[in-house]
Amino acid sequence: MSGAIIVHAGAGSGKYAPDDRRFRELLNAVEAGRAAMKKGSSLDCVEAAVRYMEECGAFNAGRGSCLTVEGKVELDAAIMSGEGRRGAGVGAVTCTYHPVTLARRVMEKTPHVLIAGERCRAYLQAAGLAAEKLRPSPTVRLRFKTLTEPGTEGRRKIDLWRGLQEGSTVGAVALDAAGVPSAAVSTGGMWLKLPGRVGDSAVIGAGIYADSKAGAASATGTGEEIIRNSLCLKACEYLMKAGAPGAARRSIELMTRESGRGTAGIITVDLKGRVGAALNTEAMGRAWYDQVKGRPVVQI
């Protein structure tokens, strides 16, 4: 087996229209990950897939990220290799559109597993990465204006806010030819979050987890509930007995029991190269490389 990969683009209420560009971007992310894995490892694969989704601007990550209540971009991300269970996360990042790469540098160059806030800039510069000024996209600026403009009827604001919590957090899990699993995740968080809020995407064991004895998982949904349930750690525990599809299903059943429906989605990969996905929301964009068909496939 040359390797396995599955990516997600967020669990929530938003279904894609037939001509939505996110279908194409999910497939492109799979191909970006596979190209990186051919030259490197599963860690290279998940970083490349997530970086592509951060850069394309179609998702709530990187250039397409939502805004805080102050109208600012603050990003969370994490990355982890099952080899030695090495991983790190970064939270409330304001200096780069690619926090997943910053998280990898923190993992590789420091003894820490979580860095947050303005100090992330110093780690970015120490790693030799260029700082960027984060500017909301025109679409995101328009949504923010609608949500915050005076005189907008309260019920309409609430309905719009709920509709925008449609996920679009991005993530990837992969297994390489050496049998090493890895996971990554990146997000702009939730619309109109308080400044400094950090969600599950920065937290090892919640937003991602990878273990060379089990596989890897990457989650999306309501960050606070995912943290409370240590969702990806639980998924990797299930991977040892249930395989990728079963672990995904069982971990989301746990979320539904403990936190209710509409709270999460997850993707998994096991040590046999099987992938899984499950959700208790209306939809979750995901794509994977189908070994039988010999091509990437996408599903909402």
Image (tube, helix red, strand yellow):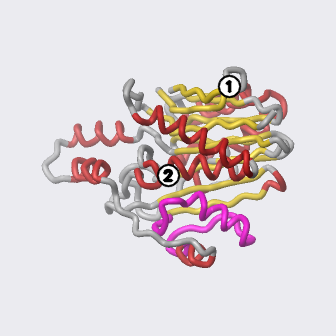
Residue bearing the label numbered 1: 294
Q: Which mark is residue 54?
A: 2
Q: CA distance from mark 2 to mark 1?
A: 26 Å
Q: Is residue 284 magenta?
A: no
Image quadrant holding the N terminus, namely top right
Q: Which residues are magenta?
A: 93-120
Q: Secondary structure at mark 1?
A: loop
User: Where residue 18 sits in the image (x, y, percent)?
Assistant: 39, 24
Q: Nearer the viewer, residue 99 or 295?
A: 295
Q: Where residue 54 sits: x, y (%)?
A: 50, 51
Pointer 2 or 1: first along the chain: 2
Q: Position of residue 70 (x, y in %)?
A: 32, 62
Q: Residues within 10 Å of mark 1 (few under 14, many from 20)?
A: few
Q: Residue 13 sits in which quadrant?
A: top left
- Name the residue: 21% across, 42% down: 154
Name, please, the residue furthest toward the top. Answer: 293
Q: Amino acid at mark 2?
A: Glu
- Label 2, residues with CA under 10 Å away: few <14, some 14-19, many ≥20: many
Q: Specify whether 253 is left or right of 140.
A: right
* Picture residue at 54% right of the left edge, 39% below the top: 28
- Residue 197 shows up from this direction: no
Q: Secondary structure at mark 2?
A: helix
Q: Amino acid at mark 1?
A: Gly
Judged by depth in the image, the label closer to the viewer, 2 or 1, is 1
